[in-house]
Amino acid sequence: MKHAQISCAIACVVLTSCAALLPDSEQISRTPWPDYQTAEQAFKSMTLETTSLQQLHDMGLDPLKTPNIVVLSYADLMRRLALSGAGEPRLLAPQIQVCIAAQTSCFAYEIEQKSMTKKRYGNFWADFLNFERKTMISGWHFDVIYIIQNERLVYKLWSGTPSIEQFEQENTPLGPFQGMGISIFTQ
């Protein structure tokens, strides 16, 4: 009799805490900024023609020490920025035109930072048996380009999403049997 009570208690605990068994995931790009606001403040604190390459490195923007910083040559800048101006370099900012003309004495750092969390929620059994999956995605995204010429910051450009909030819902009426029809006929 005691075993039946223990089994019943365990079953109750498992059934009531099933939502905790749903998978979660997190995607974070490692860079110097812990959040969107810090990245934006760092961007605003840098002054064109005044901020030096060494100051950028002191702020943690050193591709040799900080992962996920892409170093772009002047040719990479031409491909990325000139094409956005319909192939007309004269439509770009004057600092970018001078940088492209300077060629090897000019380069850029591109930093794309994402922080995303995916959390599944809803009924454990519906999710586990593949009938219905609900996922909440939250986070932020910050992308910046710093153009450096002759050891000085000459241009900066940013874009981003301060707050990402998305909901995904996937319904599969036949649950685990949904894809079996096609696989039966292809064998």
Image (tube, helix red, strand yellow):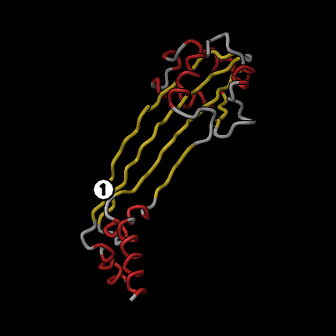
90 left or right, relative to 169: right
Q: Position of residue 123 (x, y in %)?
A: 31, 63
- Is 80 placed above or below 89 here? below
Residue at the (55%, 37%) spot, across then down: 113
Q: Quadrant of the N terminus?
A: bottom left
Task: Count neighbours of disc 1 (C-alpha within 10 A) and say few if under 14, some if 14 to 19, many if 20 or more.
Answer: few
Q: Position of residue 104 (x, y in %)?
A: 73, 24
Tell which residue pokes out farthest to the bottom in this image: 1
Disc 1 designates what residue? 169
Secondary structure of the residue carrying numbered label 1: strand
Disc count in the image?
1
Residue at the (51%, 41%) spot, across then down: 115
- Is 69 placed above or below 47 here? below
Residue 43 lies in quadrant: top right
Q: Amino acid under label 1?
A: Gln
- Is 17 placed above or below 56 here? below
Is 124 in front, or is 134?
124
Residue at the (38%, 82%) spot, across then down: 5
68 left or right, relative to 185: right
Residue 162 lies in quadrant: top left
79 left or right, relative to 104: left
Q: Position of residue 26 (x, y in %)?
A: 51, 50
Q: Quadrant of the C terminus?
A: bottom left
Is 24 in front, or is 13?
13
Residue at the (41%, 86%) spot, across then down: 2
Is 87 in front, or is 132?
132
Residue 16 lies in quadrant: bottom left
Q: Position of residue 17 (x, y in %)?
A: 39, 65
